[in-house]
Amino acid sequence: MTLPVPVSLLDRSRTRAGEPSETALRDTVERAVRAEQLGFHRFWVAEHHAVPGIASGSPPLLMAAIAARTERIRVGSGGVMLSNHRPVVVAEQARMLSSLYPGRVDLGVGRSLGFTAPVRDALGVHEYPPERFAEDLTALAGFLGDAGPVTAMPKGAPSPPLFVLATGSGLAVAAELGLPVVVGGPVLWGDLAPLQDYRQRFVPGPTCPDPYVVISADVMIADTSAAARQLVLPEAWAMVESRTTGAFPPLRSRPAMALTDRQQAKVDEHLSRAIHGTPDEVVTDLGALIHRTGADEVMAWVSTHDREAQDRSDAALAAMSSIS
């Protein structure tokens, strides 16, 4: 059975306990090379700052490294946080990448703040209301479309497709600007009214004539259901530890602490929202989510402590993917 839409990989450059953070960055580049060989549609990277568990703080730099090592696969930011950057700078970085690697670059942007108060202090951004995001997103689209007050350089360079990592308010702005969206979390597993509203309010844009929805999901595939569940656990443990200590940690092969009943409940909640199992189970569950949401594409974020198991999961996911 094949999934009805293209599937992309999101790699967050997850660090692993006992290893230097730089290893995670090299792993990301090598994983992108394998993803191209497997036939994936896109490969996305993320922006996080001063987070022990995530090494990638500069999507444009990492995208350049990946694009230089690959030939075909599209390379995207999932995403650049407009809260941390001026729109003209984001536009020029994207145009530079698109000039160097024409037809292969995608620009996903979001509005998340730093993970903790000290990180927000370091970034100098403590709040970023939806209306500010709407203003910056409109300005960014203007720069990419040569409609800004100044020219985003390099002049005449092709502008990459713009995606919005969206929640309720972001979906509304994306609809008004005629932009594709990437959604995950509560938007997927809860009330689908925000997605329906996005489609109903969508105004065709110059680069996106129809609503386009990418769903972001935690996906893990193994030979058995039990093995897949074990592979999802390192991310679940990290989420629980972050809520306990205030720091999102590297991946571990076993939990860093004895879990309380409440923490175990949070682990179970994470597992319930991850799509994991055998290839047959995952293609069925992921297909059902695609059908439920009307998704046009899947962004699968797959990470675990065991790299070889992660590679096998990638290969199994590619085998069930529809390539566009």
Image (cartoon, rainbow, N blue to C red):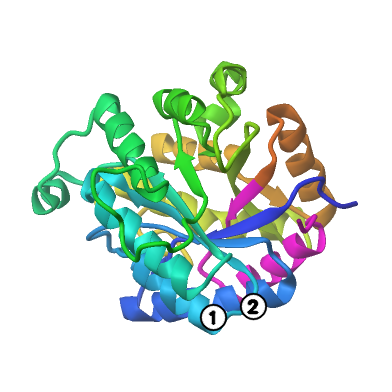
State the image quarter where residue 148 is shown: top left
On whether residue 314 falls in the magenta region, the answer is: yes
Tag 2, which secondary structure?
Answer: helix
Numbered label attached to residue 80:
none
User: Compared with residue 182, is residue 43 higher up or lower down, i.e. above or below?
Assistant: below
Visible in this render: residue 16? no
Tally of numbered discs: 2
Is 115 displayed left or right of 207 in the figure?
left
Residue at figure coordinates x 14%, y 43% from the top left: 125
Is 204 displayed left or right of 322 in the figure?
left
Residue at figure coordinates x 82%, y 45% from the top left: 4
User: Compared with residue 129, is residue 32 higher up or lower down, i.e. above or below?
Assistant: below
Tag 1, which secondary structure?
Answer: helix
Marks 1/2: CA distance? Answer: 6 Å
Q: Amino acid at mark 2?
A: Arg
- Few, some or many C-alpha atoms within 10 Å of disc 1 (few <14, some 14-19, many ≥20)? some
Closest to the observer, 69 or 28? 69
State the image quarter where residue 309 is shown: bottom right
Write the start and end of the magenta stretch as one range.
298-324
Q: Do labels 1 and 2 touch, CB within 8 Å?
A: yes
Visible in this render: residue 29? yes
Q: Amino acid at mark 1?
A: Glu
Residue 86 placement (x, y as % from top left): 22, 49
Residue 263 placement (x, y as % from top left): 40, 40
Residue at figure coordinates x 47%, y 66% from the top left: 98
Q: What residue does disc 2 label?
A: 34
Residue 229 placement (x, y as % from top left): 64, 53
Q: What residue does disc 1 label?
A: 30
- Which quadrant of the rendered structure holds the C terminus? bottom right
Residue 270 placement (x, y as % from top left): 52, 41
